[in-house]
Image (cartoon, grey):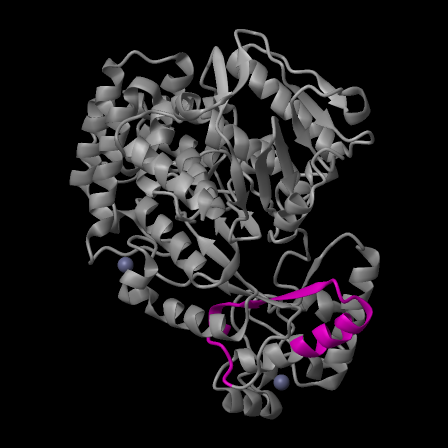
């Protein structure tokens, strides 16, 4: 509750045009942390600090030094004396019954930041929470913003104060992942509290949520290359023929031999990967569910294609629970299997990963194209409290094209949080840096996954102010233009669509005009590069459809050159999922060769 008030306060202050939170706690604060480059405070760690505590202490030390100029010493508790301190990890001084009680009430990755006497206690529900407690302190009370890889906003404060703090918070989503290329490196992932399997977070920063294998594991559980020749009956019967396809082919889930082989394989995976908490037992990509008599009968009984899947997964989960009660089994509800079964419920150690199947643009529950997803999620949430969501947020066929779904994505994340969802992956441009509004979408998604009560528009404003500097006003106007286009109830987007249907020539022309104003602003070279990247989606539309989007033949060649320069400077290597940018650029150079 307390933390929600703090979040709401940030939103109100930002909406009033107060940029950053730096001044707010200082004015109301009563504990003087640093003045000039001097401080009475020490960073205190246990006598035997874990690598995570040591890392968290260094992060706090470095950040406070950057904010105030004061470099606080890091001391082990036995050497710390009685000076006031930031107490990280389980120190004797912070080991009170009250602190332990609050800590034990937190869910995964939760943080506890608490003023105890003159000390500030920083603890976590787990190792990740321990490190995150430092980042939450820096964000909430010192106004630091981890906007993007290579862009942290550190408001300078010669006099650094803290108010009395009593903050116990855990995010609603235990698993948070954006699947943007620039969200994977360790430091940005931990600072934005992204903990997915693709993040490069080792044990020294509290590790990550590991899932093995990632998804679509039927073909790994019962490999067709090993079994199909002798036992075609293990595989799905599609239109009267058993299939060994690993896309658009599945297993025959009612065959007891298949269950036996798959169970043994999962138990083997667990023994081979003792540190992994979640193991995947999920359908292959595409369609191809088994149409044999027994499988069809289960589908009929359950009124859903997920019937045979869930019975199969539950049976494996029961065997796993006997030997490994701390391990979870994940399965997909995807493509043909999103509707929950009528009779069978997931076991307690089963995670349902439901896949996004609704319009991107205005929040799926507000669009007829998303009605099925809203209904399915609503039903699944009555059957289990372990739902993960696989959410899509880019145009997979046109990474660089405009994808005006910022408001829709924010609505969807908040919808998931309100419907019992415990894990969320927002799949974006994972194969290369860049993509339409990549840095902003990553920041917005990570902030909302940590705290869905934040005002998305305030998050957007603080990002633009920090990232684009004096050009923020133009960028915000451009974003309003994109929002307006996405509000059109007749414009829908999902998966891999032709952007001609969603980005009109008028929108592109207006966007170029708005972004053109940024050229009049005084910007740093870094900010110029960031603004340059915003032009790519609009140029992309012009270059791919020159006549419709009013590309002036006289300037076409120079736009291709600019596109190439900006893409290279930003290390963008993909134009679409699986499509390299180099051949596309070569094609454009030929198409618009200098006369
Ligand atoms: Zn079958
Ligand atoms: Zn729609």
Q: Quadrant of residue 489?
A: bottom left
Against 105, is 507 above or below?
above
Q: Is residue 319 found inside the magenta-colored segment of the image?
A: yes
- Range of residues picked out in magenta: 314-342
Q: Quadrant of residue 482?
A: top left
Residue at coordinates 30% horizontally, 52% vertically from top-left? 361
**Vertical comparison of 477 with 471: above or below:** below
274 in relation to 39, above or below:
below
Residue drawn at (61%, 60%), measured in percent from left and top?
215
Residue 425, horizontal then vertical, whole percent: 51, 52
Q: Is residue 200 visible?
A: no
Which quarter shows the C terminus?
top left
Residue 70 x/y as whole percent: 59, 11
Q: Is residue 502 left or right of residue 93?
A: left
Picture coordinates of residue 152, whole percent (x, y): 49, 24
Q: Can you tell me which quadrant of the image ligand 1 is in?
A: bottom right
Task: Identify which residue, 500 or 12, lies in the foreground.
Answer: 12
Q: Estimate the x, y position of residue 369 in percent, counting from the top left.
A: 31, 65
Tell me if 382 is positioned left or right of 82 in this view.
left
Is residue 19 magenta-colored? Answer: no
């Amino acid at each position: 509750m307390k933390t929600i008030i703090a979040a709401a306060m940030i939103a109100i202050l930002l909406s009033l045009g107060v940029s950053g939170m730096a001044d707010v706690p200082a004015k109301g604060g009563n504990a003087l942390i640093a003045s000039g480059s001097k401080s009475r405070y020490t960073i205190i760690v246990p006598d035997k600090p874990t690598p995570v505590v040591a890392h968290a202490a260094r992060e706090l030390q470095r950040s406070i030094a950057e904010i105030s100029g004061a470099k606080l010493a890091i001391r082990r508790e036995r050497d710390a004396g009685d000076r006031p301190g930031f107490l990280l990890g389980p120190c004797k001084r912070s080991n009170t019954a009250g602190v332990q009680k609050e800590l034990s009430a937190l869910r995964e990755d939760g943080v506890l930041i608490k003023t105890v006497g003159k000390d500030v206690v920083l603890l976590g529900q787990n190792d990740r929470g321990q490190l995150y407690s430092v980042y939450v302190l820096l964000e909430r009370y010192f106004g630091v913003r981890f906007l993007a890889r290579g862009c942290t906003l550190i408001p300078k404060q010669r006099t650094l104060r803290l108010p009395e703090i009593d903050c116990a918070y855990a995010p609603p989503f235990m698993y948070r992942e954006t699947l943007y290329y620039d969200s994977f490196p360790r430091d940005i992932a931990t600072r934005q509290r992204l903990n997915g399997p693709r993040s490069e977070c080792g044990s020294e920063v509290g590790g990550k949520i590991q899932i093995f294998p990632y998804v679509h594991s039927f073909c790994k559980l019962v490999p067709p290359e090993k079994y199909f020749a002798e036992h075609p009956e293990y595989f799905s019967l599609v239109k009267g023929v058993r299939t060994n396809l690993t896309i658009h082919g599945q297993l025959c889930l009612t065959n007891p031999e298949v269950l036996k082989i798959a169970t043994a394989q999962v138990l083997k995976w667990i023994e081979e990967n003792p540190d992994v908490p979640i193991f995947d037992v999920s359908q292959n990509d595409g369609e191809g569910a088994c149409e044999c008599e027994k499988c069809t009968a289960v589908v009929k009984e359950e009124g859903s294609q997920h019937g045979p899947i869930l019975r199969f997964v539950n049976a494996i989960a029961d065997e796993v629970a006997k030997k490994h009660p701390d391990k979870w089994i994940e399965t997909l509800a995807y493509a043909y299997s999103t509707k929950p079964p009528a009779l069978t419920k997931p076991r307690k150690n089963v995670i349902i990963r439901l896949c996004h199947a609704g319009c991107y643009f205005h929040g799926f529950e507000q669009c007829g194209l998303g009605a099925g997803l809203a209904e399915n999620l609503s039903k699944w949430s009555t059957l289990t409290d372990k739902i993960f969501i696989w959410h899509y947020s880019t145009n997979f066929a046109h990474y660089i094209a405009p994808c005006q779904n910022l408001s829709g994505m924010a609505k969807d994340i908040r919808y998931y949080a309100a419907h019992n969802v415990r894990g969320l992956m927002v799949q974006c441009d994972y194969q290369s840096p860049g993509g339409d509004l990549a840095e902003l979408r990553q920041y917005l998604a990570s902030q909302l996954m940590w705290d869905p009560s934040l005002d998305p528009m305030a998050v957007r404003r603080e990002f633009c102010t920090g990232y684009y500097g004096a050009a923020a006003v133009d960028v915000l106007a451009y974003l309003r233009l994109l929002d307006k286009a996405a509000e059109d109830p007749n414009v829908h987007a999902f998966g891999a669509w032709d952007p001609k249907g969603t980005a009109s020539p008028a929108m592109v022309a207006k966007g170029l005009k708005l972004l053109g104003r940024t050229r009049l602003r005084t910007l740093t070279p870094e900010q110029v590069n960031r603004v340059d990247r915003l032009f790519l989606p609009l140029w992309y539309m012009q270059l791919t459809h020159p006549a419709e989007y009013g590309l002036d033949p006289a300037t076409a060649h120079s736009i291709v050159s600019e596109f190439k320069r900006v893409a290279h400077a930003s290390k963008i290597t993909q134009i679409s999922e699986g499509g390299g940018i180099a051949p596309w650029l070569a094609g454009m150079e030929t198409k618009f060769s200098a006369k």
